Image (tube, rainbow, N blue to C red):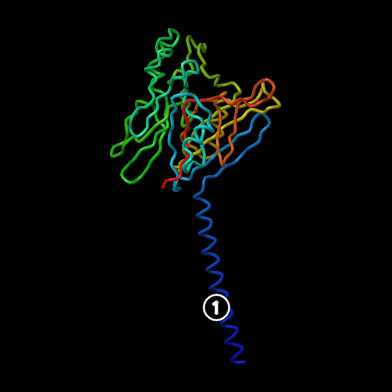
């Protein structure tokens, strides 16, 4: 009996140890999973939403890239494929002269400046709005000591103390915490009548956006039209803002949408806009945001 008792006690002790190790392993695997970039697809009657979430504690950076000539999103990824796991189309541009209409900075230097786009600055219809156009929302990456921080601010907003602006990509309007369409001249009113709506904010369309949650996670979102409803599908900007808020976003910014809307993940590129026959439109673009794994 004494020998049997010792055997039973040893078995119970071994079981406790194995259970404890299994719990530890489960915790480690869960933490590793939470560090990964997450891709999700949400199907709705009038659109499909593709989202990519980059956890704030992960080993990934979100950085802009600019091209001298217009090229597809997949071309951007191919040219900068080292450690790129995801990408989304970036800021606005003029498809005629291929010059930017959004500010872009890389390595603390402005590399795309809309003030040098003559088709923009010399357009008489836009002259009353240029001050606001040059001060639109931008996605920023700061270096603050050993930490990297992200933010969405107007172009004229100061850089926080003890931080350096590493890079930025302009778009707009800001969607969260408030809609800044009027402040950025996407929408204008005269005598309470809307006289300008540059991107059809309230209309259904393919859209792209970037957001930051309260915890600091980054969300890329691309909304694709329904090929079966080419003339009546997509999402409006207010609806997009509500969707991002539902994901926990506290700050969000619209990116160039419509035919430019595109998103890359895991070797596949998804496009947002469709033509009248429901075929995907693969428009070349000027800039992108890349999600890259840090070394």
Where is residue 94 drawn, in percent x and y? 47, 18
The residue furthest right is 228
Q: Residue reaching furthest front?
A: 79
Extreme-top residue of the structure: 124
Measuring from the top left, give residue 56's x and y in whole percent: 45, 45
Q: Residues within 10 Å of mark 1 (few under 14, many from 20)?
A: few
Whole-percent x, y for residue 158 in the image: 32, 30
Residue at point 33%, 30% (across, down): 109
**Is disc 1 placed on a helix, strand or loop?**
helix
Residue drawn 52% across the image and 39% down it = 86
Residue lying at 55% horizontally and 19% vertically, measured from the top left: 200
Total labels: the figure holds 1
Instruction: Choose top left, top right, bottom left or bottom right for residue 222.
Output: top right
In this rendering, the answer to whether 105 lies above or below 276 is: below
| Residue 79 as seen in the image, left or right of residue 233 | left
Q: Quadrant where the N terminus lies?
A: bottom right
Residue at horizontal 40 percent and vertical 38 percent from the top: 150
Residue 269 position, x and y percent, is 58, 35
**From what the image shows, is residue 116 above or below residue 17?**
above
Query: Left of 204 or right of it: where is 105?
Result: left
Q: Which residue is mark 1?
A: 13
Residue in the foreground of this view, choosing between 184 and 220: 220
């Amino acid at each position: 009996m004494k020998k049997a008792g010792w055997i039973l006690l040893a078995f119970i002790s071994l079981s406790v140890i194995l259970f404890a190790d299994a719990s530890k392993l489960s915790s480690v695997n869960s933490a590793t999973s939470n560090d990964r970039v997450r891709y999700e697809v949400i199907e709705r009657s009038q659109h499909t939403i593709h989202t990519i979430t980059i956890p704030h504690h992960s080993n990934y950076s979100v950085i802009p890239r600019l091209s001298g000539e217009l090229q597809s999103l997949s071309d951007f990824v191919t040219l900068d494929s080292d450690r790129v796991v995801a990408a989304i189309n970036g800021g606005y541009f003029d498809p005629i002269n291929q010059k930017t209409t959004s500010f872009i900075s890389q390595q603390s230097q402005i590399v795309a400046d809309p003030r040098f786009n003559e088709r923009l600055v010399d357009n008489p219809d836009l002259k009353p709005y240029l001050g606001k156009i040059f001060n639109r929302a931008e996605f920023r990456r700061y270096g603050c000591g050993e930490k990297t921080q992200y933010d969405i601010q107007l172009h004229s907003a100061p850089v926080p103390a003890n931080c350096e602006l590493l890079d930025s990509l302009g778009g707009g309007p800001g969607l969260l915490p408030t809609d800044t369409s009027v402040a950025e001249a996407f929408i204008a009113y005269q005598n309470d009548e809307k006289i300008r709506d540059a991107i059809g904010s309230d209309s259904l369309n393919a859209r792209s956006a970037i957001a930051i949650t309260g915890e600091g996670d980054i969300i890329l979102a691309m909304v694709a039209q329904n090929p079966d409803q080419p003339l009546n599908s997509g999402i409006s900007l207010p609806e997009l803002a509500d969707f991002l808020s539902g994901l926990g976003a506290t700050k969000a910014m619209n990116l160039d949408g419509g035919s430019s809307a595109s998103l890359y993940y895991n070797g596949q590129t998804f496009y947002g806009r469709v033509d009248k026959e429901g075929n995907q439109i693969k428009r070349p673009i000027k800039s992108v945001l890349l999600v890259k794994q840090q070394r």
